[in-house]
Image (tube, helix red, strand yellow):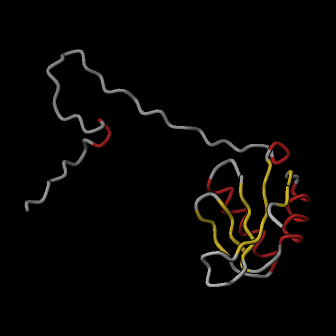
Amino acid sequence: MSKKKKLKGFESLGGMVFSTDPDYKPEEEYVEDESSIDPSKQKLYVSYDKKHRKGKVVTLVEGFEGALDELETLGKHLKSKCGTGGSVKEGEIIIQGNFVQKVIELLEKEGYKVKKKGG
C-alpha cells in the first residue's frame, strides 16, 4: 500500500490544486464567531451521573453556549469553589463528586439561569 503525499500550502484552497478557469477565485471559509453570550440569556442544566464511570459520581453542567475558553474558565471556577477535580469535555463541565446543589448556587450567583436535571 502506498502512502499519500500531502501538499503543503493548499489547505487554504480546500484541496484545490489546479483550475482551468482563469477567473477562478477560491471561496472564503465561513468562520463562525463565538462571541460571548450574556449569562442571563443562557440556560444551563446541572445533573449528577455515575453511568460509564465505574460507579463514581460526577456533577455535569450542560447547555453552555459560547467560546471554549469561556467554558474552560467557568469550569475552573466551579472546580476551585467545590475543592475537587474535573474536566471540560464535549461542551460540558464534569466535576468529580455530587455537588449539584452547590454548583446550582454558584452558577446562579454568576447570573446564569440554572435548572436541575434528573432525580
Across and down, in percent, residue 94 comes to 68, 70
Residue extending farthest to the left is: 1
Across and down, in percent, residue 68 comes to 62, 55
State which quadrant residue 95 falls in: bottom right
- The residue at 42%/33% (across/down) is 29
- The residue at 80%/60% (across/down) is 117
Q: Nearer the viewer, residue 86 or 34?
A: 86
Query: In this image, 81 relative to 76: left or right?
Result: right
Across and down, in percent, residue 13 comes to 29, 35
Number of numbered discs = 0
Q: Which of 78 and 51 is in front in this view?
A: 51
Across and down, in percent, residue 60 comes to 72, 67
Quadrant housing the C terminus: bottom right
Quadrant housing the N terminus: bottom left
Q: Nearer the viewer, residue 58 or 2?
A: 58
Residue extending farthest to the top is: 23
Query: In this image, 64 relative to 109: left or right?
Result: left
Q: Nearer the viewer, residue 100 or 24?
A: 100
**In the figure, 1 relative to 40: above or below?**
below
**In the figure, 25 relative to 15: above or below?**
above
Residue extending farthest to the front is: 119
**In the figure, 52 relative to 23: above or below?**
below
State which quadrant residue 82 falls in: bottom right
- The residue at 62%/43% (across/down) is 34
**In the figure, 87 relative to 107: above or below?**
below
